[in-house]
Image (spheres, rainbow, N blue to C red):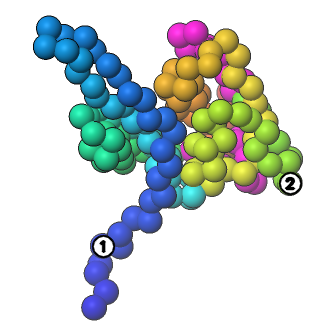
Amino acid sequence: MVDQFEEKKLEERILLIKRVTKKITGGSHITFVAVVAVGDRKGKVGVGMGKGREVPQAIRKAFTKAQKKMIKIPVYKGTIPHEVFLKYKAGVVFLKPAPEGTGLKVGSVIRTIFDLAGVYNVSGKIIGSRNQIVNTHLIMKAIGMLKDRALSVSEGTKNE
């Protein structure tokens, strides 16, 4: 029997697992932090961060948060519709569209996030920060700034 609600086919990738140690009066308190990205390869992607006493618990929390925070990326001919320049905390990101066949010429977590979203031609650079958590938040804010090409073209004709 076929359900009327089709289950979402989400792919997940772990971006970072970090062990955090805190000194307390009885000794040390150890927790784990996981950053997970999920995407459907059709333009939707989300990133979540989870904390837990064990690694699987942290990954599960991060996965559920990433599912709740999924955003849509406007895709135009397999790339992003326009250039983006954004400064967030210590990092600066510059993304620009690339022609067909170029591939993902970006580094760090950006490649994973765009791959999960289904965007296969982007060129870009992160400057100033090597912290993967900050870079993840930076790239998600930059993706949120992207506008659909059809909307921007129609808005441009209205103003003229």
Is residue 141 highlighted in magenta?
no
Q: What amino acid is labelled 1 in the image?
A: Phe
Q: Separation of disc 1 and disc 2 at Cα?
A: 36 Å
Q: Which residue lies at the image location 63% right of the left edge and 54% below the top edge? A: 118
Left or right of 100? Residue 6 is left
Task: From the image, tell me which residue sits under label 1.
Answer: 5
Q: In the rendered image, which quarter contains the N terminus?
A: bottom left
The number of callouts visible is 2
Q: Which residue lies at the image location 55% right of the left edge and 14% below the top edge? A: 88
Nearer the observer: mark 1 or 2; the answer is 2
- Up the image or down, 63 lies above or below 48; here it is below
Could you say which quadrant of the image residue 30 lies in? top left
Q: Which residue lies at the image location 69% right of the left edge and 22% below the top edge? A: 126
Location of residue 47 in the rendering, given as x and y in whole percent from the top left corner:
44, 39
Q: Farthest residue in the front direction?
A: 27
In the image shown, does 39 or 61 lie closer to the viewer? 61
Q: Looking at the rendered structure, which numbered label has been put on residue 87? A: none
Crowding around mark 2 (Cα neighbors within 10 Å: few <14, some 14 to 19, many 20+) is: few
Tag 1, which secondary structure? loop
Magenta residues, as a range? Answer: 73-94
Q: Looking at the rendered structure, which numbered label has been put on residue 101? A: 2
Q: Farthest residue in the bottom direction?
A: 1
Is residue 77 highlighted in magenta?
yes
